[in-house]
Image (spheres, rainbow, N blue to C red):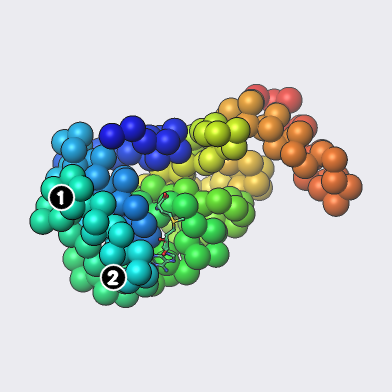
Amino acid sequence: MKLTKRLQAIVDLVPNNAKIIDIGTDHAYVPIYLYLSNITHDITATDISNRVLKSTYNNLKKYNLEEKIKLIQSNGWENIKDTYDLAIIAGMGAHTIIDILKTANLPKTLIIESNNKHDLLRKYLNSINYTLDQEIAVLDNNKYYLIMYYKLGKEKLTDEEILFGKSNNTNYYNYLYNKYSKYPKYKKYIELLEEYRSRL
Ligand SMILES: C[S@@+](CC[C@H](N)C(=O)[O-])C[C@H]1O[C@@H](n2cnc3c(N)ncnc32)[C@H](O)[C@@H]1O
């Protein structure tokens, strides 16, 4: 099974034999890949939508995994009783991800991939005592995605780290510059970005 670069970057961060939950699994490509690659077989996949879960189930069936990967309908952690080593929450907006994080007895490690407002997420996760252990900027189909790997533990992030993250990827910062520098309302942001970029 060939994953997109975004999903490949996510699965590459999953430790061997971890007990994982994929919240908002949709197509379940991440669980299917993890199982078939023998990275881990202890996988629960969830989605809020019963309609989505019907096609998730059909995808699992295609790979004969419908008995191997647990599927649960749940809004965030609402119907989840078990505990996990790692949760993956990907492909959603920051507000939805934060709402999901608020309902949980969270595991010690998290892989988060939001499609917007990364600063908001960094700030929130920092406030609930998670350390941003790794942040990877992945270019997939001409668009950058940020994959964030969090571990339980306090850290003090600077304002710049909250705003620009820890990817240290100059190409990503150049992409942000090109995207936002044409809008006058981002003038302050662009000034900070230029300063940050020049120090890398
Ligand atoms: C765009 S898909 C992302 C699928 C996959 N995680 C990925 O990164 O490719 C988002 C999925 O999250 C589900 N979702 C949205 N809010 C949710 C919530 N509160 N709890 C669980 N699933 C949710 C949606 O039904 C949808 O299937």
Residue 10 in the image, given as x and y percentages of width and height: 38, 40
Q: Is residue 85 left or right of residue 192?
A: left
Whether residues under marks 2 and 1 lie with C-beta atoms below 8 angstroms apart, the answer is no
Q: Is residue 56 left or right of residue 189?
A: left
On screen, 174 above or below 186? above
What secondary structure is found at the residue carrying circle 1? loop
Residue 33 in the image, given as x and y percentages of width and height: 26, 40
- Label drawn at residue 73: 2
Residue 68 in the image, given as x and y percentages of width and height: 12, 52
Q: Is residue 155 left or right of residue 103?
A: right
Question: Pointer 1: what residue?
Answer: 65
Residue closest to the eye, 33 or 59: 59
Residue closest to the eye, 31 or 181: 31
Q: Which image quadrant is residue 7 in?
A: top left
Q: Is residue 126 left or right of residue 16?
A: right
On screen, 17 above or below 171? below
Residue closest to the eye, 101 or 48: 48
On screen, 38 above or below 71? above
Residue 138 in the image, given as x and y percentages of width and height: 51, 33
**Disc 2 or 1, which lies upstream in sequence?**
1
Q: At 47% across and 52% down in the image, what residue appears?
A: 91
Instruction: Specify the quadrant that holds the N terminus.
Output: top left
Q: At 85% across and 40% down in the image, what residue appears?
A: 182
- Label drawn at residue 75: none
Task: Identify the amino acid type marked 1.
Answer: Leu
